[in-house]
Image (tube, coloured by chain):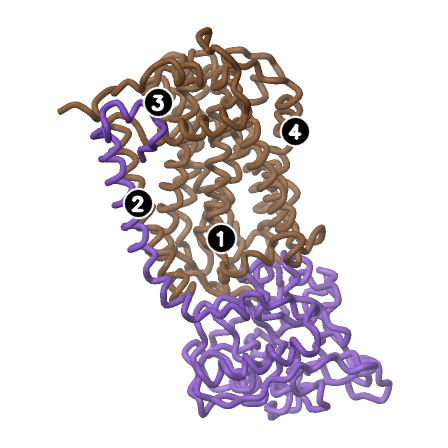
Chain colours: A brown, B purple
């Protein structure tokens, strides 16, 4: 950075930052190209299935008037949690001045961005009339705020996306041009983002818990449960990402952040199970119609039991995962820790995805039993969105990390001709 | 991906890496275009006028007329049927209410069938706004009932409870709609602007009476079976991807006629009328009969009542 002769005005340096980001996003090792090609292929399968859904109608999903939300909204709900989960890096980094965490906090912020993009995509693919999306835009549409919780969700999700884009974009850009970031331009937004992270998952829980006609969702404990499970899935995902980043890049990832996240997980896995247990106690001890959906979910009802193996898988994964986190080995054995992370991540995905959305509709409000299993088209679209989200996350990390480590900067761009690096050029 | 100002690529012309990237980008774009190709047949169905159409309550009378003519034209083109679509406002001084006598209903489902025909429902799915539950004598518990009965009615030991939209005064479906595509009219009917609904189905999740239906695909009805007397907020053929519901046959009732389900009922179980008219039959029923409101504990204040002799 010392060889930067004079300061460029922003209108010159910002386009160069964007250009360099584009180059970084498309340049990499053979592993990077294989990974991105693989994700692209999956995303294209999803795009194709979605195009068919738009043309032929949502009849190609297995949703019905009885179970009117399915795999899409299940994934949406889970991903809001994943987006909120990133805050478990932000809190130690900024509230507890954990410097090691501070160095890698961007990994959590970028995860929030990728997860939010997936959330918005899952909402859009669930719309019967995506062409009328503009009706949701305040000012030109007919935004039913503040009565509809869905309008709150539109605000908080987009707001959280904007906050994270601003924080990450600002910090990376200042780093790129070699300046010290001005705290006034990011610290207030960081603190706002902490409260905002809580709000996105609270509002998403209120979408369901506010419906008096759906006893399974109509519970005050839903928002706390959502947050607890978000703080399981988020840190679990990030622990694995941190190790991958350490493996593939030059960003120095210490063991400190991973230990901190493991410590957080040791609490949140138990909290999540405790809240689930409280819910189940109230439902089953009281019994009656309030418990009908839970009965269906956990044990089957009137001979219908499609979700039973599914939800018990989640329970086993969450309990085994929790036990593994509490075992001292989670501190020194990476494989042990990673297995635990995968278990609880999948466990939460089941529990608050399909395990939460589908039983809300079964039995129906007129107590009819109509089951739901996602169609192939729904799986294709969902996998496609996940693949796209992972592409966004990969590219975002690909840009952010060399800028953070100083490998990429305006000064270097000015100083050296582009080195024709690594494997891509090997004959 | 090379730019003339980029001195690094200038040095050795277009690098191999850049060429591979360009090839990759081209292939990717081509594959994406191929993946999204089915959309072509969808965009050909969409018109700019329809896309830009305003919310029902923001349409001027002239704009409304244009919309109605366009919808009639669409019906002719897509279904081969000549229909008239009106925009019928609520009548001043009228508040609709509906009551159903559980003591006499025999569960014949003639009401559901009449609804199916009157409201131009999709033929393949046999859709209707009414579901008739066969209930066990001695219990109002719907868990012990079924809508899927298939035998001669009335069956011994059973009674029958048709359920349709309760037109709640405190309607959760209206509250949850993010785009105000559904609302309560002055005469108490909860309506949907099928040209404004985005199809999120939040209302379907919110309704405790299973009153709402979604158009999972484009409705199919043979031209000769289409009911040509239609209204914008009522029985006109719904587009794909939007929610619909019972509207108390407002295309009939706002012209002084009775709902189709009532006219079809062979037992006279159904009573419909103006709650503001003290001499109406509905008022007499509500004042003199034993009235039961389904899920009254939810506090939604329905306009639909059950009663017993």
How many labels sit on residues? 4
Marks 1 and 2 sit apart, C-alpha to C-alpha, by 18 Å
- Disc 3 marks which residue? A244
Marks 3 and 2 sit apart, C-alpha to C-alpha, by 21 Å
Tag 1 near tag 3, CB within 8 Å: no
Observer-nearest of B74 and B179: B74
The reply to the same-chain question for discs 1 and 4 is: yes
The residue sitting at 53% across, 40% down in the picture is A80
Within 10 Å of the Cα at label 3, are there few (<14), some (14-19), or many (20+) other Cα atoms? few
- The residue mark sitting in front, 3 or 4, is 4
- Residue A325 disc label: none
Residue A264: x, y in percent? 52, 21
Marks 3 and 4 sit apart, C-alpha to C-alpha, by 29 Å
Quadrant location of residue A165? top right
Tag 4 near tag 2, CB within 8 Å: no
* Nearest to N terminus: mark 1 or mark 4: 1
- Local SS, label 1: helix
Query: Mark 3 falls within which chain?
Result: A
Quadrant location of residue B88? bottom right
Marks 1 and 4 sit apart, C-alpha to C-alpha, by 27 Å
- Disc 2 marks which residue? A42
* Nearest to N terminus: mark 1 or mark 3: 1
Within 10 Å of the Cα at label 2, are there few (<14), some (14-19), or many (20+) other Cα atoms? many
Within 10 Å of the Cα at label 1, are there few (<14), some (14-19), or many (20+) other Cα atoms? some
Residue A50: x, y in percent? 38, 56
- Local SS, label 2: helix
């Amino acid at each position: 950075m010392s060889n930067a002769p004079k300061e460029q005005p922003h209108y010159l340096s910002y386009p160069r930052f964007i250009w360099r980001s584009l180059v970084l996003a498309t340049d990499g090792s053979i592993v990077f190209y294989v990974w991105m090609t693989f994700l692209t292929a999956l995303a294209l399968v999803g795009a194709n299935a979605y195009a068919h859904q738009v043309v032929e109608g949502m009849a190609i999903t297995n949703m019905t008037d009885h179970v009117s939300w399915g795999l899409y909204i299940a994934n949406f709900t889970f991903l809001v949690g994943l987006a909120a989960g990133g805050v478990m890096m932000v809190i130690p980094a900024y509230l507890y001045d954990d410097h090691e965490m501070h160095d890698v906090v961007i990994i959590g912020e970028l995860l929030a961005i990728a997860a939010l993009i997936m959330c918005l995509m899952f909402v859009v693919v669930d719309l019967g009339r995506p062409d009328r999306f503009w009706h949701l835009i305040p000012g030109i549409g007919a935004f039913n705020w503040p009565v509809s919780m869905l309008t709150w969700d539109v605000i908080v999700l987009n707001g959280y996306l904007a906050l994270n884009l601003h924080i990450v974009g600002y910090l990376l850009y200042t780093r790129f041009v070699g300046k010290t970031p001005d705290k006034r331009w990011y610290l207030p937004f960081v603190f706002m983002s902490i409260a905002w992270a809580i709000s996105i998952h609270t509002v998403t829980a209120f979408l369901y818990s506010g419906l008096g006609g759906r006893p399974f969702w109509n519970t005050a404990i839903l928002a706390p449960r959502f947050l607890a499970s978000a703080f399981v899935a988020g840190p679990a995902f990030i622990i694995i990402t941190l190790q991958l980043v350490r493996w593939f890049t030059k960003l120095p990832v210490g063991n400190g952040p991973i230990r901190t996240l493991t410590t957080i997980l040791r609490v949140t896995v138990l909290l999540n199970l405790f809240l689930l247990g409280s819910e189940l106690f109230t439902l089953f001890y009281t019994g009656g119609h309030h418990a009908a959906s839970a009965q269906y979910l956990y044990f089957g009802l009137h001979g219908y039991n499609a979700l039973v193996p599914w939800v018990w898988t989640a329970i086993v994964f969450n309990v085994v995962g929790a036990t593994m986190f509490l075992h001292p080995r989670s501190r020194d054995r990476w494989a042990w820790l990673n297995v635990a992370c995968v278990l609880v991540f999948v466990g939460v995905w089941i529990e608050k995805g399909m395990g939460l959305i589908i039983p809300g509709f079964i039995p129906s409000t007129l107590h009819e039993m109509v089951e739901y299993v996602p169609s192939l088209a729904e799986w294709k679209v969902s996998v496609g969105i996940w693949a796209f989200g992972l592409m966004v996350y990969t590219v975002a990390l690909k840009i952010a990390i060399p800028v953070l480590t100083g490998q990429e900067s305006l000064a270097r761009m000015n100083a050296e001709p582009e080195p024709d690096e690594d494997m891509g050029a090997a004959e | 991906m090379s730019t003339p100002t980029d001195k690094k690529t200038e040095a050795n012309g277009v690098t191999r890496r850049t060429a591979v990237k360009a090839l990759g980008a081209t292939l990717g774009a081509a594959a994406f275009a191929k993946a999204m190709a089915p959309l072509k047949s969808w965009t050909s169905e969409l018109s700019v006028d329809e896309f830009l159409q305003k919310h029902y309550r923001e349409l001027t009378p002239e704009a409304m007329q244009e919309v109605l003519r366009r919808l009639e034209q669409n019906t002719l083109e897509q279904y081969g049927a000549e229909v008239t679509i009106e925009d019928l406002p609520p009548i001043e001084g009228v508040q609709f209410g509906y009551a159903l006598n559980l003591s006499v209903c025999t569960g014949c489902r003639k009401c559901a069938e009449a609804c199916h025909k009157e409201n131009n429902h999709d033929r393949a799915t046999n859709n209707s706004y009414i579901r008739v539950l066969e209930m066990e004598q001695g219990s109002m518990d719907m868990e012990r009932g079924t809508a899927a009965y298939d035998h001669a009615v009335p069956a011994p030991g059973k009674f029958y409870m048709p359920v349709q939209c309760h037109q709640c005064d405190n309607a959760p479906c209206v509250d949850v709609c993010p785009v105000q595509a559904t609302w309560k009219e002055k005469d108490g009917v909860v309506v949907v602007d099928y040209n404004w609904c985005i199809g999120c189905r939040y209302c379907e999740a919110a309704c405790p009476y299973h009153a709402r239906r979604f158009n999972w695909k484009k409705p199919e009805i043979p031209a000769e079976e289409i009911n040509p007397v239609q209204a914008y907020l009522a029985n006109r053929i719904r587009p794909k991807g939007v929610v619909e519901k019972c509207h108390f046959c407002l295309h009939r009732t706002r012209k002084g006629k009775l709902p189709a389900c009532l006219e079809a009922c062979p037992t006279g179980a159904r009573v419909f009328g103006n709650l503001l008219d003290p001499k109406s039959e509905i008022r007499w029923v509500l004042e003199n009969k034993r009235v039961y409101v389904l899920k009254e504990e939810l506090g939604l204040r329905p306009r639909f009542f059950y009663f017993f002799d």
